[in-house]
Image (cartoon, rainbow, N blue to C red):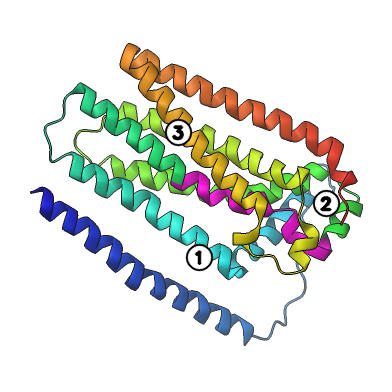
Amino acid sequence: NLGSLLMLAIVLVVLNYFVARPLYFKIINNLKESQSGKKFKHKPKPLKLNKKGQVDYYSLFLDKEMKLFFRDEKQMKSTYTYVLLFPLLLFCLNVIYSSFKINYLGQLIIYVINIFLGLVLLLSSNISSAMALSGEGEEFYLLKIAPINVKNILWAKITVNFLVSTIIILITIVSLSFVAFINVRELAYIALIYYFVNTGHIFWSFELDLMNPRIKEAIEGETIDDNKNATKSIFIGVILAFIFAFLAYFFISKESYEGWYKVIAIAIMFFLARLYLLINRLNVYFKEIEY
């Protein structure tokens, strides 16, 4: 019954938080300790070259960002929490919904709730992009004078955020496919909305840091909770979640499948607009950033 399902969902969340989470970080700490005790005798890896025989700076910066991602305990905890909550929460909620007799309107409302909650959790994890430049601190000056295309730095910094978010989306969609009343076609539509809105929000979050970098504050030890760009990123994410949930209800309630296409089209336009704005502002403002 409903009470049992609610209790099951609560128990799963509690067990996951107090058992899986500490175990995960214990494993990570053990790996760090074992790696710190190793003596590295091998020679430095040769620089990667692209097809033109030039140094592949994108790969170099991406490798650096990946290492920083796994070494930053605060970011790891934040990302792990959202990876955990996003698929688990939506799966538990939809299992509960599936225990009821649902008509067309009820199913539409459930889809809208999935879009809203999914985007809120997903977009909240993009705070790393809202602190990408500021997080460099004193090393930011080296990025400015590096003799490479600044786009290599941009793409490397947001690629990690993009990959983690995309993996979360895939895990969520796969988990929701086991819920009986959810159609595979609707799952694909929801996945596309997640993907384009989330990627557009990653671009927007990075742009927040580009236009108002907090490098000095980062050097002085500013935390994520105090970072205004991170706060703005979360606020914008909630607003976007509300807007696309409203659009989904408005269009789908009138035109069913055609409504889905319209919402996806708007999500794609949002994605393209944020990409265009970011690239243009990056070319104009990156070299002007001071601290």
Give the label on residue 55, or none.
Answer: 2
User: Which amino acid is tagged 3?
Assistant: Phe
User: Residues under labels 2 and 3: Cα distance?
Assistant: 44 Å
Mark in the foreground, 3 or 1: 3
Residue 189 seen in this snapshot? yes
Q: Which residues are magenta?
A: 121-139
User: Which amino acid is tagged 2?
Assistant: Val
Residue 212 in the image, given as x and y percentages of width and height: 76, 47
User: Which amino acid is tagged 1?
Assistant: Lys
Left or right? Give the position of 166 relative to 36. Answer: left
Please tell me which residue is depicted at 70% across the width and 43% down the height of the picture: 208
Residue 115 higher or lower than 105, as above or below: below
Q: Residues within 10 Å of mark 1 (few under 14, many from 20)?
A: some
Report helix, strand or loop for mark 3.
Answer: helix
Residue 246 in the image, given as x and y percentages of width and height: 41, 26
Q: Is residue 127 magenta?
A: yes
Report helix, strand or loop for mark 1.
Answer: helix
- Residue ID for mark 3: 242
Q: Earlier in the sequence, mark 2 or mark 3?
A: 2
The answer to which image quadrant residue 270 occupies is: top right
